[in-house]
Amino acid sequence: MKGNEQKISFVEKIGYSLGDLAANLIFQTLMTFLAFFYTDVYKIPPNIASTIIFVGGMTGAFFNPIMGIIADRTHTRWGKFRPWILWTSIPFGVMAILAFRAPEYNLNGKIAYALITYILLVIIYSANNLPYASLSGVMTGSMKERNSISSYRFTAVMIAQFIVQSLLLPLVYILGDGNKTVGFEKAIMMFAIIGVVFFIITFLTTRERIHPKREQKTPIKEDLKDLFRNKPWFAMLLATIFIFITLSLKGGMYVYYFDNYLNAPSLQSFLNDVGFNSLITHLNKFLVSIGMHGFKWPDDPATSGFSIFNAIGIIMMIVGIGISKPMADTYGKRNVFGYSIVLSALTLVAFYFYSPSAIYLVFITQCIHGFFYGISTPLLWAMIADVADYSEWKNNRRATAIIFSAMIFGLKAGLSIGGALVAGILGFYGYNELLQEQSQQTVSGIQLAISLYPALTFLLAAASLFLYEIGKHKELQIQEDLEKRRS
């Protein structure tokens, strides 16, 4: 491959990143609100919701290796991976809409409906996102370009995360006029339509440039043998599982933290002090003055505080993403990734020591946490692309999708375990969605679930990197050797 063929245009990077924005409108909703939707909207008991999330998610997770084998053996004029993004775009949107509907069934009917729609959604997600992720490994052979692609991609992820974590809950109340069931249906339908359009743009604007040798045979047995002898692959599998357990656990628990742990009057004072309530008041006056209806932002401090908390965290993550590429280029992906995860874990520990009225400390710590975690965000996917190169370098055979199946399996397993832990911890500590005020035991459980518990799983993710032997010097060696072979 010639050097100029490794350069990726701005348009292609944007087009590729839109695919992750589309997927994350749904994925971030699952990670942040699925447990809340099942317990507080669909009125499924927490322990049963925990089982649905775990069983449904793990079913989708175990589909990933199968999808990896299928994708690696797909041959079309568009390539191996791009067609799957197109083929699954509409089914993905349809299943997202169905999974966040709340039809009026009895409890057994609700359980069956929730389980079936969730399983189908995560299977379609695998069929879409595994080829999408694998595509980044065949767009270019340049590891620096992959760092750049990942930065574009995860800026798009942050935009989706900002929309979901900061605006979805208020949007649910606004679109549903206070009815959360109607609000979720309308909001997810809007996300699904946007997602389908973005997936099609990704298909149209990207190219696959790295292909297996024409004479390469791909017996499944050899692919699996290569996989299980690949220590960096195993390291990334473990790291991904623990990272997404962390993200799903703390992300899903924050809405309960604001509703049940933080002191509402203190939160209201904070919103007044930072000018948020004044901003909403002036926005309403402006809209009314130009003949429009007022902006019906929810007036409870928990919803507003939750939205701002997530928003500032995401803004600081984008700042972290901005310095991720130059740091990775200088020090290597593994080192930068590991240190950022450890520092992120330490900031989570701080939440354990804050009282319900320490609102300023909560928000300052979220800023610091978002910055440190943001540095690691684009590196996760770039590292797994490097693992695919490592496998080709070591075995002289390329099987991109089966390598990326580790990432998607870990993502699904982490989402399933973390989401199940949200509902399971709530059930274990006695959460009752019908109570206006939860018991002290429940409140303490919620505090642990956004501090010490996710800090532990973040540290386990960092520890997994001791098995990841692709340091800075080996990255360059692999890239140079593969360029010679491919030319």
Image: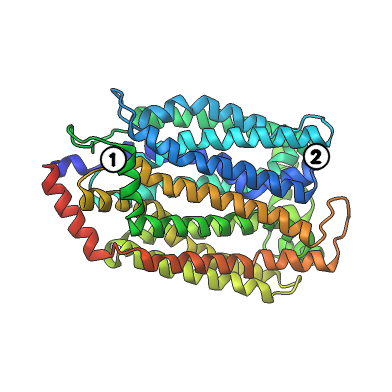
Query: Label 1 amino acid?
Result: Val
Q: What is the basis of the colouring in this image? A: rainbow
Quadrant of image for the C terminus: top left
Say whether marks 1 and 2 touch (CB < 8 Å).
no
Can residue 51 be seen? yes
Can residue 277 be seen? no
Instruction: Tell me which residue sits at (38%, 36%) in the image.
Output: 69
Relative to 23, 84 lies left or right: left
User: Residue 138, which numbered label?
Assistant: 1
Which residue is denoted by mark 2 in the rendering? 178
Residue 365 percent location from the top left of the image:
59, 69
Relative to 464, 265 lies left or right: right
> Nearer the observer, disc 1 or disc 2?
1
Q: Nearer the viewer, residue 206 or 432?
A: 432
| Direction bottom: furthest residue | 353
Query: Label 2 amino acid?
Result: Gly
In the depicted structure, whether residue 175 falls above or below residue 406: above
